[in-house]
Amino acid sequence: QVNLQASGPGLVKPSEALSLTCTVSGGSIDTYYWTWIRQPPGKGLEWIGYIFSSGSTTYSPSLKSRVSMSVDTSANQFSLRLSSVTAADTALYFCARGGPGDLEFWGQGALVTVSS
Amino acid sequence: SYVLTQPPSVSEAPGKTAMITCGGDNIGRKSVHWYQQKAGQAPVLIIHFDSGRPSGIPERFSGSNSGNTATLTISRVEVGDEADYYCHVWDSSGDRAVFGGGTRLTVL
C-alpha cells in the first residue's frame, strides 16, 4: 500500500511563499504522476497541478503564475511552492498519486493558514 | 472552462439506493472518477474510469457515464456511507483537472 504524507509550515504570512513536501512510502516515485490538490475550509476540492517523476509539470491555469513543483526521486519526495500567498490560499493541501487520470492514493493533508 | 455540476445534497434511507449525478458538457466522452470524503479524512477513490471499482471498494458502489451526465449509484445505503462525494475529470482541451462541487450524502 502506497502512503503519502504532506508536511510543511502550518502558518505562512501574506505575500510570502508556501512550501510543502510530500513523502511517498511503500512504493517508488518513479514512473508515476504526482498531484497536489487543496481544499479551503468547508469547501470543495481544487486541483493545483501535477508533476511526473521525470520532472515535467502541468499546472492549473488559475495558479500557474504562482506555482512551481519539483521532485526528488532519491528521497522519494515531491514538493509544492506557491508564491505571494493571500488569505484565499488558506486550505488543507493534499498530495496524491496520479495525474491526468484517476488519483489512486491520497495523503492525509496538511493545513496551511495564511495570516500575519 | 469545463464545469462539473453536482447537487449539493442527497438524502436516502438505510437500505435504499442513492444516486449522485455529475453533469458536464458531453461528459460521456470523458473518463469520470469518483471520490468519497468522510468528515476529517482525505478523499478515497471509489470509482475510476466511469465504472471501475478499485480494490477493496464494495460492489454496492457503481458508476455510469453517458451523454451529459455521469452517475454514482450506492446500493443498500449504510449509515457509514455518509460523506461528501466528488466527481473528477481531465479536461484535455484546457489541460487541467476539474472537480465537481461535491455532494453531501445524508443517510436518514
Image (cartoon, grey):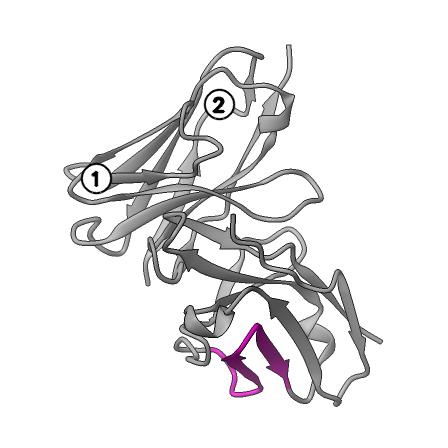
Q: How many marks?
A: 2
Q: In the rendered view, does B96 fall on the left or right side of B106?
A: left
Query: What type is the residue that disc 2 sits on?
Result: Pro
* Chain on which label 1 sits: A
2 or 1: tag closer to the N-terminus: 2
Q: Residue drawn 68% across and 39% down? A: A41
Q: Is residue B69 magenta?
A: yes
* Numbered mark located on residue B6 in the image: none
Circle 1 is placed at which residue position? Answer: A56
Q: Is residue A28 above or below residue B103?
A: above
Q: Residue at x 41, y 80 (%)?
A: B52
Q: Quadrant of the N terminus of chain A?
A: bottom left
In the rendered image, residue B4, in percent from the top left (x then y), is placed at 59, 59
Could you say where residue A104 lies in the image, as x and y percent from the top left? 38, 62
A104 to the left or right of A110: left
Examine the image and state in which quarter residue B14 appears.
bottom right
What mark, if any, has residue A9 been given in the picture? 2
Q: Chief secondary structure of the magenta span? A: strand
* Percent position of residue A20, x then y: 41, 29
Write down the chain letter for disc 2.
A
Q: Secondary structure at mark 1?
A: loop
Along the viewing direction, whichever of A98 and B8 lies nearer the viewer: B8
Nearest to the observer: residue B4 or residue A10: B4
Residue at the spot 65% in from the left edge and 88% down from the top edge: B75
